[in-house]
Each structure stands twice: as C-alpha cells, then as structure tokens.
Image (spheres, rainbow, N blue to C red):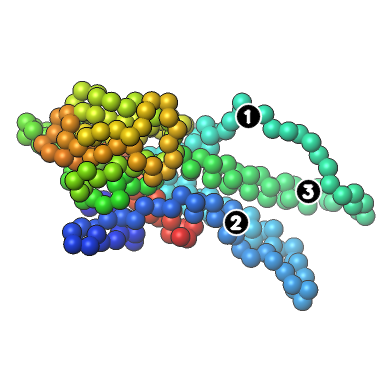
Amino acid sequence: MLVAAPVLAVTPGSGAAVPVPPERPAIEKLAASGPDTSVTKAEPVTKAEPTKLRAWIATHLKSLDRLLAKSGLDLTELVAQAERPDLQLSDGQGGPLVPALARRLPGQVNAARGGSLDLERLQRVQVALRSVPLATPMSEYKLNSRFGYRRDPLNRRGAMHTGLDFGGPANAPVLATAPGEVVEAGRSGAYGVMVVIDHGMGLETRYAHLRSVKVRVGQKVALHQPVGIMGRTGRTTGAHLHYEIRLDGRALNPAQFLEAGGQLKQLVGS
C-alpha cells in the first residue's frame, strides 16, 4: 500500500489500513505556529528574535518544497499561478503617529524587509496549498491497483494505469480531495460515470466508474464534499473508484500526494 505509514488507521472489522485524511485547516498554522516571540516584563525583546523567525519560516518553506517536489509539483510555480491579479485590493495607509527618534540603518531596513518578504511568501504558499489535492477520496478503502505500468485487468496485457484504484464499501461516498470547480459530471467512455474537478494552477482530479454523481458542472465544491457514489460503470471488472490527479493534462501519481498530505499534517500538527 502506498499511503504514508505514520498516518494509518485501521477500519474496524476490515483489517485494512486506511490513511487518515489530512486536515486542511492545519495548514493555516504554518504562519501562526512559529517560535514563541512573546515576552514578559522580565524578558526584554532581543534583536535575535526576527532572525529566529526568518530561520523558522525558511526551514518550513524548504520542507514544503521537498514535500511538493515528491508529488511532481514545483512550489514556486504553484505560488506564482495562485496569484490573483484580477483581485482589486484597497491601498489606504494609516495608523497612530509615532515620531521617529532616529533613522534606521540601511542594514536594519533591509533585514526587516527580508523578513516581511519571507512571511509574505509563506502566506502565498498557504493559499496555493489549499487547492492542492492532498486528501484521500474515500473515508474507508483498500488499494486495489497502483499507478504506473501493470497487467491490464481485462485483456491481461501490459498497459499504463494513470491513477489509483480504490475498493470500498457498497455505495461508498466519493469525496473531493481539494476545493475546486466541477468541469465534468457524467458519462465519459471507458471512465464510465466520472466527475472532474478543476483546482486551478493546472491541477485537476478525476473520479471515475461512479454509480451516480452528486454535483453538477460549474458547481464549486469544498474539501471532503461528496461528489458521487462508488460504482462499476465504464471499463471495469467490478465496483471501485479510479482516481487521477493531472497537472496540465499530465497524469501524476496520486499516492505521492497522499504521502505528502500525511507528512504535511505531521509538519504543522493536527
């Protein structure tokens, strides 16, 4: 099984290992759970604190880069594509007047600006990660077939499998693995009844062989929202979910996303 071992749970009565879906709200803690920079009256603020905060942010950004790289994604590109140039933001300024007793040295100004840029990038990373499919598409399942080359289950010849096949309980709900917009919902050849969700940044997920769909084209869906019911429509030997993740039309291994999601949960806490 390809899911990350540190986040496995066992479904009662099945003996099957089931990865716990990563909690997306935990991502929000990345900017808020840094080193404790609070002080008391007995502990004056030291000049080292901004440096410690910058080091913490840099470490987490590197960790996130590594996690996403394992999934075949470039974090820098994702962040760039997650920008919203069409969003109009106000540009007002203000605050209480506090006279400056002395000008800052250029080095101090640059250091402060650098820390602000690091934190700004971390915040943009948070926005991008909200739309990355790191969760599992079923709450209870077993892995029937992996991503990559395999012997086709119908003609027994070598073929490329572009996703993961999940087996689950009868009439199991199929869940969106990240927020997005439904761009396809209905029959699609060998996929049978399929739902396709566009997550932006060139990312889309496909949920195939469904018995029925619970969403419509153009609908916005949230993380873990049911999009259909597991079935056996299309080219299949029996009831299961065929799940794909694609980046600019190229199939990626969903197992690496599940692993990255589990590690991300460990990184930021539950």
Quarter of the image for residue 48 reads bottom right
In primary-sequence order, the first of circles 3 and 2 is 2
- Along the viewing direction, whichever of 249 and 196 lies nearer the viewer: 196
Q: Residue at x 83, y 42 (%)?
A: 94
The tag on residue 32 is 2
- Amino acid carrying mark 3 in the image: Val
- Along the viewing direction, whichever of 241 and 133 lies nearer the viewer: 241
In primary-sequence order, the first of circles 1 and 2 is 2
**Marks 3 and 2, how far apart at CA:** 23 Å
User: Residue 226, image x and y in percent?
Assistant: 35, 41
Q: Residue at x 22, y 43 (%)?
A: 171
User: Residue 16, image x and y in percent?
Assistant: 20, 57
3 vs 2, front mark? 2
- Amino acid carrying mark 2 in the image: Ala
Q: Residue at x 21, y 48 (%)?
A: 168
**Marks 1 and 2, how far apart at CA:** 25 Å
User: Residue 63, image x and y in percent?
Assistant: 48, 52
Instruction: Name above or below for residue 9 compared with residue 157.
Output: below
Quarter of the image for residue 53 reads bottom right
Look at mark 3 in the image and give the residue it sits on: 109
3 vs 1, front mark? 1
Residue at the extreme left of the image, as rendered: 156
Residue at the extreme bottom of the image, as rendered: 42
Look at mark 1 in the image and give the residue it sits on: 87
Q: Image check: 52 left or right of 206?
A: right
Instruction: Name above or below for residue 220 compared with residue 33.
Output: above
In primary-sequence order, the first of circles 3 and 1 is 1
- Along the viewing direction, whichever of 162 and 240 lies nearer the viewer: 240
The secondary structure type at the circle numbered 1 is: loop
Q: Image check: 259 left or right of 201?
A: left
